[in-house]
Amino acid sequence: MEYALERFTAQVKAVIAATGRVAPALIETATPKSTIPADVAFPAFRAAKELRVPPAQLAAELAVAITIPDGSLIGKVEAVGPFLNFSMHPQRLATAVLAEIATRGDGYGRQPDGVGKTVVVDYSAPNIAKRMHVGHIRSTIIGQSLVNIFRALGYTVVGDNHLGDWGKQFGVVLASIALYGTPDAEGETALEELEAQYSRYAAAAKEQPELDEEARIWSLRLEQGDPHARALWQWCVDLTMHAAQRNYDRLGVHIDHAYGESFYEDMLPGVISAALEKGVAFREDGGAVVIENLDNLSTFLLQRSDGGTLYMTRDVATVLFRLTEFHPSRLIYVVGEPQALHLRQLFALTRAMGNAQGVDLTHVAFGTVFDASGQPLSTRRGNMVYLESLLDEAVARARAVVEKKSPDLPEDEKAAVAEAVGVGAVVYNDLYQDTKRNITLDWERMLATDGNSATYLQYSHARCRSILRRAEADGSAPSDASLLTHPAETSLIKHLARLPEALREAGTRYAPFVIADWCYTTAREFGVFFEQCQVLKAESSELRAARLSLVAATAHALKVGLGLLGIRAPERM
Ligand code: ARG
């Protein structure tokens, strides 16, 4: 069954068609400007031209000719100049929307658009023996939200964590461990030490060329399957993934696969020969395999002159594997803007080799992260932020907010709320605006209890739940939603009805911020409603019950919206 807003639009088209004046193909509706007190408009221009009458005349004629059937979601139709404006019937809308939120439950907003289709989302993708820096954090958070959004759109979604666990630099990792030993620490601290060892080794190799040779031998051993090299590699993978998993759990991130770059090793010769056979790549005299003049992109390599393969080679193999393994209709790469050229080359090469025809290849790029003083975070600057410490700091700061706002909560609940609020602040900061934009780590704004922050949204949800607790109602008791006719109520209800279309738009535009905007407007609309309408002290018990059911619907829809972003909604705050 379609959602109320979809039914409303369909009904508008049907009543226009029923007049027999306008051919169905010419019946297209539009959203009126926000200053116009109507919900859907029919601009009469095209139809009028066809009929050779002035648009305003046609609109006026149609307004008279239209009959609104009993029980329709259309409340009113009115001609204004060349437009035919339709408004919803507030009582019927309220009844329909509250009923659909209640019956669909956690599935509210879901759409069937993607049923039978698969999308693969490439996200997170940390590098082994390194900590997850802000780039990986953004990829993880944006990627998981897109996974949630596409699942809610009915797609079969396959998440794949394309770990950086291979390549030349891995020889350095292994050689440095062989030289300096394994760090005596755990989690991110151990990874930090490995990174330090790596830098120490790389610096030393500048003076001592034999260290370079040693690293090269280690990477060769690894590629040839030497058991010692393999065991050391596995130890690094386990250490990194164990640390990552703790963070993923806190973020509510679940990635279906982690094949990683190493998985594709055996497929690389096939990739290189296929590119040569198709004539897309050629082998230079020195032995390197080169791709030139492809779609005006700069020249790039598929194989080095020493026979070594590259990040690109493994990425091509990855595309081919994903196509045969999952038969996706889309492949989505959630990777930072600096890799835009790499991905353009990858997509162009894959297609030039005759693959991925009819498959949508998309790079969801994201911007840089700046600190509160406006400096981009970078390892070289020394202001880089890593995932675990970022989450810990967020939770510590959230804890202070909770202590201030809800001093009476029991200790364990305070801890749980601080975790949800702190992690939510970090997640929302990545999602509340277009992913391409840069973001700032500004704790004041991120944890503001009013304004566009997760904290404000979580508070709004908790406020709804607290009203329901005080009324000892969950909003599911029979109530007559048609009593909800106050403009603030109607406005809130119309907005709640928009979650399904917001979800669809978020998927089409790869834009979690559309959901974030929807959540923020919901919270604001709720604020207006709560200020203008008495809930617990409503004029009558019937109205009280109806308003409580609106509060319950708001809480529920907001929780669903936050869930799409990967943000938890505590019951109390
Ligand atoms: N591991 C890479 C990095 O840290 C990101 C991988 C992105 N995914 C891909 N298929 N290339 O930069």
Image (spheres, rainbow, N blue to C red):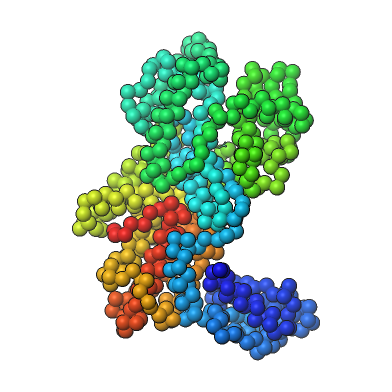
Q: Position of residue 177 (x, y in %)?
A: 42, 18
Q: Quadrant of the C terminus?
A: bottom left
Please state if 404 lies on the left or on the right of 43 as rendered.
Answer: left
On the rendering, which quadrant does ligand 1 occupy?
A: top right
**Residue 178 higher or lower than 321, as above or below:** above
Please state if 410 lies on the left or on the right of 421 as rendered.
Answer: left
Can residue 256 be seen from the camera position used here? yes
Which residue is at a point 48% across and 63% down the rendered structure image? 108
Which residue is at a point 53% across and 34% down the rendered structure image? 259
Q: Position of residue 529 (x, y in %)?
A: 38, 74
Q: Nearer the viewer, residue 432 or 191?
A: 191
Please state if 442 lies on the left or on the right of 352 as rendered.
Answer: left
Q: Nearer the viewer, residue 201 or 159?
A: 159
Which residue is at a point 59% across and 72% down the rendered structure image? 31
Q: Quadrant of the N terminus?
A: bottom right
Q: Position of residue 73 (x, y in %)?
A: 54, 79
Q: Position of residue 509 (x, y in %)?
A: 58, 55
